[in-house]
Amino acid sequence: KYISDQQKQIDAMDERWAAQREKQKQLMKEKMRGKDVEGLRGTNSFIEDSGVHRWNMRWGHEPGRQGVGDSVGLCSEIAENFGPFAPPVLGCKGGVSLGLYANGELLYDGKVIATLVGPKRELKEEELDD
């Protein structure tokens, strides 16, 4: 089968571009290594002087990374950066959020301000299968 010189040049260029794209992809992966924590922001607001608010939360999974990748918290209206970042996302420097992490650490402005100790976690057999 005959392939023209022009097609050979196009094929060679396509191969170079594909190799360059793959190299760029690997560089981005390396640059983002460890910066894969993202936050999701809900829009429940609290009216000033509205009293004490309580809620229950249940993790739908077993937190990994010794609990530093899973948190719940509060953020101010000026909090804009939700990742991807290296942890912590909530309670990070800047003082615009407060984060309670699955490992019990309560963070504000990039510092652990308290550590909560709860009951030892025991998973039921059916939870391990999920």
Image (tube, grey):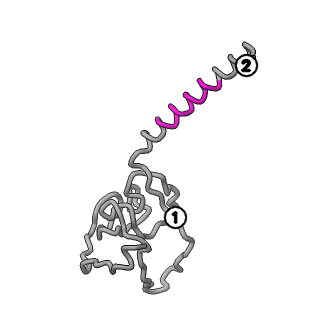
* Image coords of residue 128 (percent x, y): 36, 73
Please identify the residue farthest to the front as the structure is shown. 1
The prevailing secondary structure element of the residues shown in magenta is helix
- The residue lying at 50 percent from left, 31 percent from top is 23
125 is higher (above) or lower (below) than 61: below
* Image coords of residue 91 (percent x, y): 38, 62
Please identify the residue farthest to the top as the structure is shown. 5
- The residue lying at 49 percent from left, 85 percent from top is 50
Residues at marks 1 and 2, CA–CA distance in whole angstroms: 48 Å
* Image coords of residue 120 (percent x, y): 24, 78
Q: Earlier in the sequence, mark 1 or mark 2?
A: 2
The residue that label 2 is drawn on is: 7
Q: Which mark is residue 40?
A: 1
- Report the front residue among 49 and 18: 18
Asked if residue 21 lies in the magenta stretch, the reply is: yes
**Rendered image quadrant of residue 116:** bottom left
Quarter holding the C terminus is bottom left
Is there a contact, CB below 8 Å, between mark 1 and mark 2?
Answer: no
Amino acid type, residue under disc 2 in the picture: Gln
Foreground label between 1 and 2? 2
Amino acid type, residue under disc 1 in the picture: Leu
